[in-house]
Image (cartoon, rainbow, N blue to C red):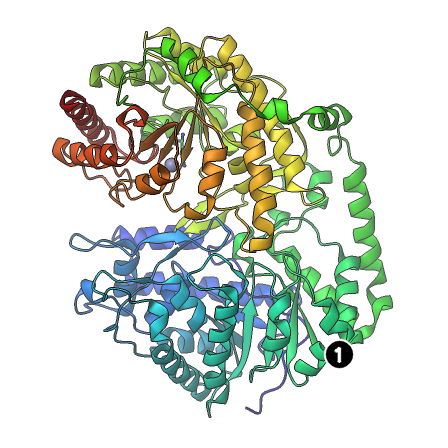
Amino acid sequence: MTAAPLPQATILGYPRIGRRRELKRAVESFWAGRISEPELQQTAAQLRAATRARLVELGLPAAGAAVPESFSFYDQVLDATLAVGAIPSRFGAPTGSDLDTYFRLARGDAEHQPLEMTKWFDTNYHYSVPEIDGETGFAANATALVEQFREAQEQGIETRPVLVGPVTYLLLAKASDAAADGFDPIDRLDDLVGVYAALLEALAAAGVSWVQLDEPALVSDSLRVTREETLGLVERAYAVLGGAGTRPRILIAAPYGNSAAALTRLGALPVEAVHADLVRGSLPDAALADGSLAQAFAGTQLVAGVVDGRNIWRTDLRGAFAQLTQLTDAGIATVVGTSNNLQHVPHDVRDETKLEGRLRSWLAFADQKVEQVAILARGLAEGAAAIEPELAEVDRVLADRDAAPGVHSDPIRARVAASGDDDRTRVTEEDRRAAQQDLGIPHLATTTIGSFPQTPEIRKARAAFVRGEIDEAAYEGFLREEIASVIRLQEEIGLDVLVHGEAERNDMVQYFAELLDGFAVTEHGWVQSYGSRATRPSILWGDVSRPAPMTVRWSEYAQSLTDRPVKGMLTGPVTILAWSFVRDDQPLSDTAAQVALALRDEIEDLVDAGITIVQVDEPALRELLPLDRDRQAAYLDWSVGAFRLATGGARAGVQIHTHLCYSEFGEIIDAVDGLDADVTSIEAARSRMDVVQPLGDHGYSRGIGPGVYDIHSPRVPGVDEQTELIRIAAARIPGEQLWVNPDCGLKTRGYDETVASLTNLVLAAKAVRAEA
Ligand code: GLN
Ligand code: ZN
């Protein structure tokens, strides 16, 4: 370990999808058999080379491991699975190349279900969940890490390999189906640490001077162990890794939350650098003041994550610099960094040539964040005066943002301020139930979650409209025909509560963002969602209001075609925030209330147009739950409050539905109840209705639609299978509360399988109804 300390500027990672989503195209071409593995590898190598060169150009030094090597073909947790050889035995003996194995785990094949995917901490990024048991045969495989490092060396850039750390890896894993009862993956920590030691040795042998091990488990209260236990596990693991003879220097990173309470103990570990997220988190003031932090960090560098890697706003450089000097004044060896891997932000604001110039000047995507890190590092090296022009420039930009039209609207603010508990409270459940009798909804009513298949024809028509090849009248005519056919189809299938099918929506958030004031949409602002998939979050920059109705004409038209009720379909305030880049100059609760009021007006207009059932989707309610337990109550309070503000104006006879995309909401069950929706649909088919029991035990008294049809695969569930699931649910909660629906929307499915599956769903509901 003769290597030098880290240079004063670094980032934890950089987007890997490519500025124009080149990786997506290459990977999908490879899957489709259109390009070979060497061709895919070549594209990936070019992307990595371009990334490294770009990072150096933006101000990270080429020498000294400032540049992270954070490429991934699909997912960083899956990369770790391959690196530690934790291939679940259910996949059989590996055949083909490492990359074949990798993609087989990610995507499954004819005989194998893929690894499950779930959300990465409180982000909208999904990772592939490792499956571990007592027999998992760990074995170090540093090939990919070493190859990429060498590739960089040839380019004249010294990089720092990045890997998910052993504690986080096991805490994010699940016990495989083969595991013994009571087994927890973390039981294998000592074995896994041995494998990491072997990886480190291989990296050192290849000349790697620094390695970054990501341990975000340190900041989460939502794992299977307490935060204190996690810290203990980290201490145990790194005592071993730090003590290993031949190894690179180690940087432990703790992104996504607050590690302040653990920082002194982390600084005392036998590693050479520790990262703290100082955007979501803070510095331990007392330990800073009494010198104990500095003492713990003697001989250890602190990578201060002062540039926000989760959002797209220009950093308040003066504030960030003040945080940094607090550390340096205390005598701590400080490196300027980002709060987290920049994989959650798009590449480059400079590509957004169509964004209004003033708004654009307030923004910073990944490339701009790297520049900010470099500026701050120069300030540390040369003194504040050296970067005063840059600090002053940001002061000016932030003042401009604050004063710009649309950022603060008095009428909108007054309306939020005037809204009270009354506006968030509907009449009692009993009164609503009585009033909703008039809707004539049968026992075990059948419905869907909203979207019907987005066919190539729909996409083609939308693209033609966006390009100006067909006019608005032609496009609207096309959508009306689409709605008419979806209504006819649902009547033929025999569903009870119909939907208009959402053909007009490109995306459930962007559609609303384009129609609300206070939002902007980007052209190239893609961020990876999972694997080869990316989303383009909208930018919520100003006070939000609704200049005109957004969905009324579609719902009204659909309702005019049928005697059965058609559900109005809206995306809820929390989900709109979660899947956008949201202004950071006011509390989220204020922004959510503004969005809620816009939706409240939309519901009023829907009801005036004759719609009697309105669904407000909140699939992101769980996702935004803070990792920090101390912050959860406040979050649940405002998020539930926003939903209630959106829906609270609906009269008793109007039935409010909501949809939650996932079933793991143990921690937020009170909040789900608190939404006070008349009917809640949830994913449940894959877990075979596991979610129903806790809701029943909780005394949940309103309608529940646990999904009986797993829409994540093209498989058509039979009548018997769906009947069985309805019976299981009916055994756990009173049948009067039960609705019958798929797990989620059908937009990714084809029509043949959709029709077959829904036909079976209706038959299954009828079968169970007949038993009653
Ligand atoms: N109404 C939406 C749909 O059906 C809900 C999608 C979601 O929950 N992600 O597509
Ligand atoms: Zn869903």
**x and y percent of residue 201 in the render?**
42, 86
Picture quadrant where residue 320 is located: bottom right
Picture quadrant where residue 327 is located: bottom right
In-front residue for pair 447/402: 447
Disc count in the image?
1
Q: Is residue 347 left or right of residue 318?
A: left
- Work out whether 119 lies above or below 156: above
Q: Quadrant of ligand 1?
A: top left
Picture quadrant where residue 184 is located: bottom left
In-front residue for pair 723/113: 723
Q: In this view of the protein, can residue 214 be seen by the observer?
A: no
Which residue sits at x=46%, y=84%?
A: 241
Q: Amino acid at mark 1?
A: Gly
**x and y percent of residue 286 in the render?**
74, 70
Mark 1 = which residue? 291
Under circle 1, the secondary element is: loop
Which residue sits at x=44%, y=67%?
A: 168
**x and y percent of residue 297 in the render?**
67, 80
How many C-alpha atoms fall within 10 Å of the one at disc 1: few (<14), some, or many (≥20)?
A: some
Q: Looking at the figure, which quarter contains the C terminus?
A: top left
